[in-house]
Image (spheres, helix red, strand yellow):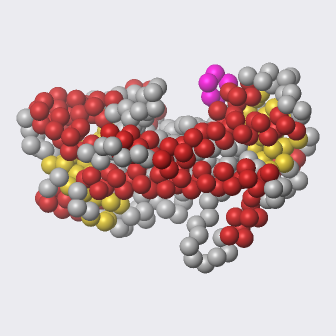
Amino acid sequence: MSYVGVIGQGYVGLPLSIAMAEANHRVIGYDNNATLIGELIQGKSHIEDVTNSKLMELIKSGFYLPTTTPSKLNDCEIIVIALPTPLTENKEPDLKFIYSAVDLISNTVTGEKLIINESTSYPGTLRNEIAKRISAISGINHRYASAPERIDPGNKVWTIKKTPRIIAGLDFDSLCEASAFYSTFTDIVIRVSSPEVAEMSKLVENSFRQVNIAFVNEVAQISQRFEISVLEVLEAAASKPYGFMKFLPGAGVGGHCIPIDPIYLAFESEKKGIKSSFIKLSNEINESMPLYVVSRVAQYFNNNLKDKKILIIGLAYKSDVSDTRESPAIKVIKILRTTGALVAWHDNLVKFWNGEKSQEILDYDIAIIVTKHANLDLDKVRKIPYVFDCLGSLESTARQ
């Protein structure tokens, strides 16, 4: 059993903290968001993968302590950074949250610790942006390791325990210590030669998905011109038992990983003089999909959506989670509102967004299915005169 501090209690940090606590580590879950921590202390989880009952059980048992007090990290032998790595307004990597963790550790932690970065970033982040900066500020020779997060919200099969983890250390002792630690709550630990390899592997994983999703989104547009079903095409191609991996089209990509991680890779690659043409093109295609969806719907109504009552179904970026980060549905809504359409949205899991609330599936002219949760009332959806299904999953509707 170790005392572990996890900096960040969001979509990665909270389930990670709970997995560690369930493995009998005593976890300090630190976040500077007082409202979030206050809710966690009351046993209110903000993500589906952590139930309120499990959260409260671990708090009462003393294995999980949510806090806004930085000094409690001094009690920990291991400190894990699990913070978002967004983009700036110019679509460039933004490490402001990583740097806030660097400052926190440098100015708070007094003894030597094992510091592990789970936050996704470009190769060299652990070595140059974390270890070097902390050492320069604090003068303490901590041990450092990289373990890029592999959390898929809502996935009941590939949980933290079952998903293999990539581990690397700045030195051999750090690698061994981090590997032993992750082995206590993860079934498979894979060691790689350097943090740069670990960091690159995470970016490649999601760039692979970005490229292939963009490909099938383009195939969807081509198939529509040929007046054939893209879903039937993909199903036929997927019958080949080798050499093909099935991806499905949609209204774009969302979440923190696929829309963002490839840009981190492209940004650093171009700094080294290497063009990332596939990644750039894939990003452009996927970002254009919300506009394509709106154009398909508008085409059916003679390019006039003014005063049409339109319901967007599914605000979250993926099925059966409430996460709206980078959701293509939000982009579809914004584009539709520029046409003069009267736009509302319905999501069984997302109750409030941007000062608006989820609406009932009632009297609308048009419905656009962007994300379909398991408990969606399809009978009500079918009563709407025109339904455009970005997923192609509902019978007797317009499809991608």
83 and 400: which one is in front? 400
Q: Residue 335: say if magenta.
A: no
Left or right of residue 172: residue 179: right
317 and 34: which one is in front? 317
115 and 39: which one is in front? 115
Outermost residue, bottom direction? Answer: 241
Residue that appears at 49% across and 62% down: 158
Q: Establish if 102 lies above or below 261.
A: above
Q: Quadrant of the N terminus?
A: bottom left
Q: Position of residue 10 (x, y in %)?
A: 43, 39
Q: Position of residue 276 (x, y in %)?
A: 43, 47
Residue that appears at 76% across and 55% down: 223
Asked whether residue 175 is in view, the answer is yes
Left or right of residue 155: residue 148: left
Residue that appears at 61% across and 47% down: 318
Query: Residue 227 appears in which quarter of the rendering?
Result: bottom right
Left or right of residue 175: residue 219: right
Asked whether residue 25 is in view, the answer is no
Q: Establish if 134 lies above or below 183.
A: above
Q: Position of residue 284 (x, y in %)?
A: 57, 41
Q: Which residues are magenta?
A: 352-356
Residue that appears at 70% across and 35% down: 291
Query: Residue 189 appears in which quarter of the rendering?
Result: bottom left
User: How many marks can you see?
Assistant: 0
Main SS, magenta residues: strand
Q: Position of residue 298 (x, y in %)?
A: 83, 34
Left or right of residue 70: residue 388: right
Q: Residue 353: say if magenta.
A: yes
Q: Establish if 286 lies above or below 334.
A: below
